[in-house]
Structure formats: structure tokens, C-alpha cells
Image (tube, rainbow, N blue to C red):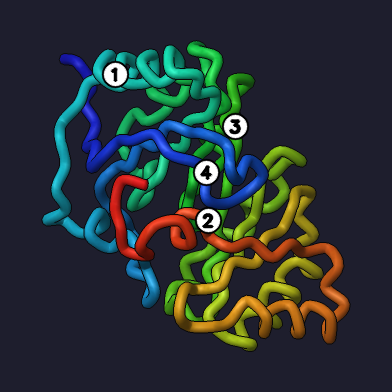
Amino acid sequence: MEKTFRLAEHFISINGEGQTAGELALFLRFAGCNLRCEWCDTSWACGSDAPYEEVTTDRIANIAEEAVARGVRNVTLTGGEPLLQPDISVIINRLIELGLRTEIETNGSVQLKYFCSPRRPVFTMDYKLPSSGMEQHMLTENFPLLREGDTVKFVCASREDVLRAKEIAEKYRPQCPLYLSPVFGRIEPAEIVEIMKEQHMGGFRLQLQLHKLIWAPDKRGV
């Protein structure tokens, strides 16, 4: 029986965050998530009632091939939590075969070791801070698996969050870039900068979600 996947939406836009921010990317958003963060900005794609289309591996490959033909070199699997999709490794390998830089946006609660084969994707891994209400689900054993091309993203809604990010980084020392991302409307970027200065957080980068600056913050498909 052919494998199918729950695809909530797909579109081409710029990467709004991370090491390829500003570059064109194909986004494949999968439905379903095992966490419920207080400030989630894609909650519509997370619940059991999330809208989705059942798609085959070949259908996703066709979408990716069309993107490549339009000059796209990056693909981001997001959600929800894309790594919860059964057999998602099949999709990851197919996208890598097409020559795409294949990035997984994962929420920090899924074991990454099962996806660290020789054909390894790039991981942007969240670490959920206190304001999310989900920190207890974080798997710190993922940190040693991260490489220079990966990213750890700390989404911050408060001073407490920023200080906790510093604490986690000092304890686990992930070998990849560390980003502080303010929750839109909850904490001002300038406040995070002041905390970074005060706490000597030179190993972190502040990032703003470009797509929320270019388009309306709640606009989908961008």
C-alpha cells in the first residue's frame, strides 16, 4: 500500500527565520502536533481536526520538482510537528535526492536519532521555554546530535524565557547557532537586546520573523 501523509498546506516563500532567512524556500506544512504551546502561531494545523490533504510520496516529490524548476533550493518541513508523520523519512530522503537543502522544523520533543542517517536533513530544533507551558516535554538528549548547520531556536515571551535560554545553552552547549526569537506582541525585540547585553549573551543571535514584518502577522501561506 502506498504511503500517504497529512499535508496541511504547501507554498513557496522566503525563509522567515534561521540560517537561510531571506532565501526562497518551499514550505511543506504537515498537520498534527503533540504539544500545545501557549503562544503557538500555527495552532490551526495542530489539532485532530486540522484540515489536511492526504498526499503520496510522489505527489510531494512533484510539488518539490516544480519548486526546483522555479529556482528554489531549500525545502522546509514544518507543522504542527512534521516528525510525527509515519514514514516521514521516506519524504526526507526523496527531497534530499532532488538536491534540496532539506530542513526540519521540530519542536524539541521528538527523538532526532532516528533521522540522523547518512542522508541527514538540517534540523531547526526548538527548545520550549517556560512561557510555552511545554518545557517538561523537551528531550535534552537531542543536543549532542546537532551539528554546525543546524539551529536551536528559543522562542521568548518574557525576561524569564531569555534567562532560561542562557541557562540551557550553558548546560548543554549545542554545537550550532542559537537564536532568540521574540513572541510577536509579547516582548519587544529591544528588551531582548538589553538582556543579551546585560547577561553577556554573545553566543546568541536575535532573529525577527521576517514574514510577520512583510505580511500581516496572521497571514497564512507566506
Q: Position of residue 29 (x, y in %)?
A: 33, 42
Q: Nearer the viewer, residue 135 or 57?
A: 57
Dot 2 or dot 4: first in sequence order is 4
* Type of the residue with mark 1: Thr
Q: Position of residue 166 (x, y in %)?
A: 74, 74
- Seen at 22% across and 21% down, the residue is 56
- Label number found at residue 116: 3
The reply to whether callout 2 and callout 1 are in contact (CB within 8 Å) is no
* Picture quadrant where residue 217 is located: bottom left
- Seen at 48% across and 49% down, the residue is 106
Cα distance in 3D space between marks 2 and 4: 8 Å
Cα distance in 3D space between marks 2 and 3: 29 Å
- Label number found at residue 210: 2
Which one is closest to the eye, mark 1 or mark 4? 4
- Residue located beneath label 4 in the image: 15
- Residue located beneath label 1 in the image: 57
Quarter of the image where the N terminus is located: top left
* Type of the residue with mark 4: Asn
Q: Position of residue 186 (x, y in %)?
A: 48, 83
Which one is closest to the eye, mark 2 or mark 1? 2
Direction from residue 196 to residue 141 in the image, left or right: left
Q: Position of residue 118 (x, y in %)?
A: 63, 20
Direction from residue 189 to residue 40 in the image, left or right: left
Is the residue 16 above or below the residue 9 in the image?
below
Q: Residues within 10 Å of mark 1 (few under 14, many from 20)?
A: some
Dot 1 or dot 3: first in sequence order is 1
Dot 2 or dot 3: first in sequence order is 3
Which one is closest to the eye, mark 1 or mark 3? 1
Is the residue 3 above or below the residue 45 in the image?
above
